[in-house]
Image: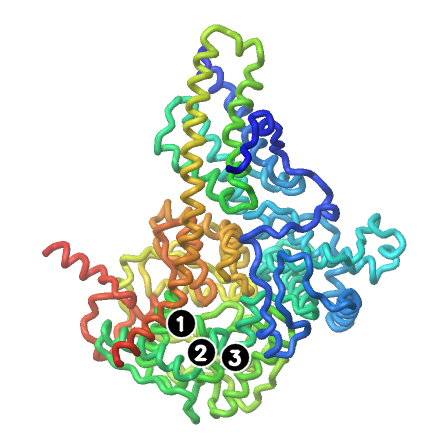
C-alpha cells in the first residue's frame, strides 16, 4: 500500500503559489497543456531539419550540437528580413494593456501567457545578443542567455498561442503578438521542434494536397455520402464535377469540411447552393485544401503549401476562385497568397455570374470568400429563402479571429445569417467583432492530447456563449471557420451543454427552397423541421 | 446576535478573504488581473470565482447544502478542474472557509456560549460542500476524457462508414 501522509504532514500544505520572478521560474511541462512532438517522417517529407524521435517531456531533445548558433543566426536573419519583428522587439514599454486580454492567460492564470511576457521570452534573448545595453547590463536590462531551459520555455508557450491577435487590438503601439509567435515557431522549426498535429498535416498536404491526406477517390467518395444525404432530405440528386478543365470557378475549401461533422453539413450546404444556382464550378482533388498548416510552421512552408491553388487554377483554366468557410485560410489567402505565389494575372477579376457583381476587393488575388458571395446573392434577391425552417434554432455568431479581427469580415456573415434565421442573438460586446474571443484551439492546437489547454483557452468564448444560452435560449453557435466547427463543439460540451455548433452555409441550405425539391421534413442533420414537429405534436 | 447574523454582517469581508485564498494558488503576477471580479466577460475567471463564492457562502449560512448550490459550485470548480492543479490543490480553497470564519470572529467570540455549536453546524455544511465539490470535480475530469473519446469517434466516423459500405458490398 502506498504511504499515506500523516495529519501533521498534511497540515504543512502551503496554499500559496511560490512567487519567483518569471526568469527564475523554469518551465514545467504539464500534461494536457502541450501536443506530441513532430515525428521524423513528417519532417523528412518536407525536408525540414533534425528529423528524429523525441518527446517534449524528455530531458534530451536530441538537438544538433550547434543549436544555439542556429537560433541566434535565425533571429539575426529575421531581424534583417522583417522590419515588424525588429520593431516589436524594441518598442514594447511593458504597459500591460495586453496582459489580461489573452484567452490563454484568462483561462490558465499563468503569467507567461500574458502577451507581453510571451514576447519577453524572445525579447530577453534578443536584448542579450543584439543590443549593447543587454550585452553590458544583462539582467538589469531585461536580458538573459539562451539556454536549454529558455528554449523549452519558448516551445511550451509559443504552442500556447493561437495567433488570434486579440492582444494587438489593445496594444497602444499595435504590437502584433501573432507575428512574434509566428517568428518564434519558425525559429523552433530550425531545430525540428514542431508539434505532430501541425507537422503531420503539413506533410500530408505537401504529398496529397490536403491536411487529412485524403486521396482523390476518398474525396469523391466522401462527397458521395453527402450527396446521398442531400437526396434523402431534398429528393434531388446532385452531380458535382471534379478537376474539370474550362469550368468558370474553382472551389477550394478546408478539407475538414469533407471529413467530420459538423463541417460536413456545411459542405452539403455549398453543394446545394451551387446546384441551385447552376454554377459553372469544379472541385479539385489536388488543390483540395484551403487551410494552411504550413503557415503555423514557417513563412516558407506556408508559401510552398499555398502554391498549388494558383497552379491548379491555371491548369484548369478557370476564371476565378471561390473559397469555402475557413478562418486562417482566408487570412493566408488574402494577406499572403498574392505576394507569395502571385500575381495571378492569368485569372480574371471575380464577377458573380448570377448577380453580375464585380468583387473589386479581390481585384488582385482573384479569390472570393463564400460569405461575401452569398451575401451578394441575397442582397440581389437571387435565393428563395424560408428562414422559418430554422425556427427551432436560436443562433449566436462567433467571429472567427482571422476573418473578423484579421480581415474585417464582420457584416457579410451577419447579413446572411439575418436572412436565413429568425432568431439571432449577439454575444456581449466585448466578446465579438474585433474583440472576439478565440476558440482556444487555432493554429494547429486542435489536437486531443492538449484538451485541458483547449478548454482553458476557449473559456472566455464559452462564458459569453453561456450567457446568451441562459438569457436568450441560444442553442446554436454559428461561424465560418473549419477549426471552429471542429473545436467549439467539445468546448460547448464542457462549458455550455445544450449549445450546438454549425457553419453558415448549413443554415443557408436549410432555409433555401430549391427548385423541384420534395417537401422537406428534416434539416441536413436529419432532425425534424419545426413545422413537422408541430404537426406531429398536434396529431 | 446569533452566529448566522454575525456572519451575514461580516459577509463581504469573509467572502473577500475566501476569494483571496483561492487566488493565492495563482502566481503573484497573475493575481492582480484575476482580482478584477466585476468584468463578467473580459475576466470571466475572476468574475465567476467571486460570484460563485458569494452564493456558496449564503448556502453555508443556511447550513444546508443541496443540489441548489450546483450553479455556484460550478462557477468555482469547473475552471480549476482543467487548470494545472492536483485535485487537492484545485479544491483546497473551499475548506479554507472554516479558518477564515474563525479568524474573522476572533478567539473571544469563538469561546462565547452557543457559538461553538453553531460553528459545528457551519463546519458540517462546509464539509458537505467539499463532498459536492469532489463529485463535480470528478464529473469535469470524466467529461474531458469523454470529449477526447467523442472527438476520436467523430474523426473516424466517415472512415468507419466507408469501411462498412465496402464490407457490405463484399
Residue A19 rendering spot, x and y as whole percentages = 69, 39
Q: Residues within 10 Å of mark 1 (few under 14, many from 20)?
A: many
- Residue at the right extreme of this rendering: A136
Residue at x 38%, y 28% (from the top left corner): B65
- Residue at the top extreme of this rendering: B113
Q: Chain of mark 3?
A: A
Q: Chain of mark 1?
A: A
Q: Nearer the viewer, residue A213 or A325?
A: A213
Sequence-earlier tag: 2 or 3: 2
Mark in front: 2 vs 3: 2
Gap in Å between the C-alphas at discs 3 and 1?
33 Å
Gap in Å between the C-alphas at discs 2 and 1?
9 Å
Q: Nearer the viewer, residue B151 or B34?
A: B151
A349 on left or right of B30: left
Q: Helix, strand, or loop for circle 1?
A: loop
Q: Chain of mark 2?
A: A
Q: Determine the image quadrant of residue B62.
A: top left
Q: Determine the image quadrant of residue A520.
A: bottom left
Q: Helix, strand, or loop for circle 3?
A: helix
Sequence-earlier tag: 2 or 1: 2
Residue A259 circle label? 1
Residue picked out by circle 3: A360
> Are tags 2 and 1 found on a single chain?
yes
Q: Helix, strand, or loop for circle 2?
A: loop
Sequence-earlier tag: 3 or 1: 1
Gap in Å between the C-alphas at discs 2 and 3?
34 Å
A479 on left or right of A224: right
Residue A35 visible: yes
Residue at x 57%, y 47% (from the top left corner): A108
A533 on left or right of A248: left
Amino acid at each position: 500500500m502506498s504511504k499515506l501522509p500523516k495529519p501533521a504532514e498534511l497540515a504543512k500544505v502551503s496554499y500559496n503559489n511560490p512567487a519567483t520572478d518569471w526568469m527564475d521560474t523554469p518551465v514545467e511541462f504539464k500534461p494536457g497543456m502541450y501536443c506530441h512532438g513532430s515525428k521524423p517522417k513528417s519532417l523528412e517529407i518536407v525536408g525540414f531539419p533534425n528529423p528524429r524521435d523525441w518527446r517534449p517531456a524528455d530531458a534530451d531533445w536530441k538537438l544538433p550540437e550547434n543549436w544555439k548558433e542556429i537560433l541566434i543566426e535565425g533571429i539575426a536573419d529575421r531581424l534583417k528580413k522583417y522590419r515588424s519583428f525588429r520593431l516589436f522587439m524594441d518598442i514594447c514599454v511593458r504597459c500591460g494593456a495586453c496582459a489580461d486580454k489573452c484567452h490563454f492567460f484568462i483561462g490558465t492564470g499563468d503569467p507567461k501567457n500574458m502577451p507581453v511576457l510571451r514576447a519577453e521570452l524572445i525579447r530577453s534573448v534578443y536584448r542579450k545578443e543584439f543590443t549593447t545595453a543587454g550585452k553590458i547590463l544583462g539582467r538589469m536590462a531585461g536580458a538573459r542567455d539562451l539556454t536549454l531551459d529558455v528554449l523549452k520555455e519558448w516551445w511550451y508557450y509559443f504552442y500556447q498561442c493561437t495567433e488570434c491577435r486579440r492582444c494587438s487590438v489593445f496594444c497602444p503601439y499595435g504590437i502584433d503578438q501573432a507575428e512574434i509567435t509566428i517568428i518564434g515557431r519558425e525559429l523552433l522549426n530550425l531545430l525540428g521542434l514542431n508539434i505532430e498535429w501541425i507537422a503531420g498535416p503539413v506533410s500530408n498536404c505537401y504529398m496529397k494536397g490536403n491536411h487529412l491526406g485524403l486521396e482523390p477517390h476518398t474525396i469523391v467518395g466522401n462527397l458521395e455520402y453527402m450527396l446521398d444525404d442531400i437526396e434523402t432530405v431534398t429528393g434531388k440528386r446532385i452531380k458535382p464535377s471534379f478537376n474539370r478543365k474550362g469550368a468558370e470557378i474553382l472551389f477550394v475549401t478546408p478539407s475538414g469540411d469533407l471529413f467530420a461533422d459538423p463541417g460536413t453539413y456545411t459542405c452539403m450546404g455549398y453543394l446545394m447552393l451551387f446546384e441551385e444556382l447552376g454554377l459553372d464550378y469544379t472541385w479539385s482533388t489536388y488543390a483540395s485544401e484551403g487551410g494552411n498548416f504550413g503557415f503555423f510552421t514557417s513563412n516558407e512552408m506556408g508559401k510552398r503549401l499555398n502554391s498549388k491553388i494558383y497552379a491548379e487554377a491555371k491548369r484548369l483554366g478557370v476564371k476565378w476562385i471561390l473559397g469555402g468557410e475557413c478562418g486562417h485560410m482566408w487570412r493566408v489567402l488574402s494577406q499572403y497568397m498574392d505576394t507569395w505565389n502571385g500575381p495571378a494575372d492569368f485569372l480574371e477579376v471575380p464577377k458573380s455570374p448570377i448577380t453580375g457583381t464585380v468583387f473589386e476587393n479581390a481585384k488582385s488575388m482573384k479569390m472570393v470568400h463564400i460569405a461575401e458571395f452569398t451575401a451578394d446573392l441575397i442582397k440581389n434577391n437571387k435565393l428563395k429563402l424560408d428562414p422559418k425552417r430554422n425556427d427551432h434554432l436560436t443562433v449566436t455568431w462567433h467571429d472567427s479571429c482571422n476573418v473578423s479581427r484579421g480581415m474585417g469580415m464582420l457584416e457579410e456573415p451577419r447579413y446572411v445569417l439575418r436572412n436565413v434565421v429568425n432568431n439571432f442573438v449577439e454575444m456581449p460586446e466585448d466578446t465579438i467583432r474585433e474583440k472576439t474571443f478565440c476558440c482556444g484551439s487555432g493554429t494547429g492546437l486542435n489536437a486531443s492530447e492538449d484538451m485541458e489547454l483547449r478548454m482553458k483557452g476557449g473559456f472566455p468564448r464559452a462564458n459569453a456563449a453561456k450567457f446568451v444560452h441562459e438569457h436568450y435560449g441560444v442553442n446554436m453557435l454559428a461561424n465560418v471557420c473549419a477549426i471552429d466547427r471542429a473545436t467549439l463543439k467539445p468546448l460547448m460540451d464542457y462549458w455550455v451543454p445544450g449549445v450546438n455548433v454549425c457553419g453558415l452555409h448549413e443554415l443557408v441550405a436549410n432555409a433555401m427552397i430549391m427548385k423541384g425539391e420534395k417537401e422537406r421534413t428534416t434539416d441536413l442533420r436529419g432532425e425534424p423541421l419545426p413545422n413537422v414537429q408541430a404537426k406531429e405534436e398536434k396529431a | 446576535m446569533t452566529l448566522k447574523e454575525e456572519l451575514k454582517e461580516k459577509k463581504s469581508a469573509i467572502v473577500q478573504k475566501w476569494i483571496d485564498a483561492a487566488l493565492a494558488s495563482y502566481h503573484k503576477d497573475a493575481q492582480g488581473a484575476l482580482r478584477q471580479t466585476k468584468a463578467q466577460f473580459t475576466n470571466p475567471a475572476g468574475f465567476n470565482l467571486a460570484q460563485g463564492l458569494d452564493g456558496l457562502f449564503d448556502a453555508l449560512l443556511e447550513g444546508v447544502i443541496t443540489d441548489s448550490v450546483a450553479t455556484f459550485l460550478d462557477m468555482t470548480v469547473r475552471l480549476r478542474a482543467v487548470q494545472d492543479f492536483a485535485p487537492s490543490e484545485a479544491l483546497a480553497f473551499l475548506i479554507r472557509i472554516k479558518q477564515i470564519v474563525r479568524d474573522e470572529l476572533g478567539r473571544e467570540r469563538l469561546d462565547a456560549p452557543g457559538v461553538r455549536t453553531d460553528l459545528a453546524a457551519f463546519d458540517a455544511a462546509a464539509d458537505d460542500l467539499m463532498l459536492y465539490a469532489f463529485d463535480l470535480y470528478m464529473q469535469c475530469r470524466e467529461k474531458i476524457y469523454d470529449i477526447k473519446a467523442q472527438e476520436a469517434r467523430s474523426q473516424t466516423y466517415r472512415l468507419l462508414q466507408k469501411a462498412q459500405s465496402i464490407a457490405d458490398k463484399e
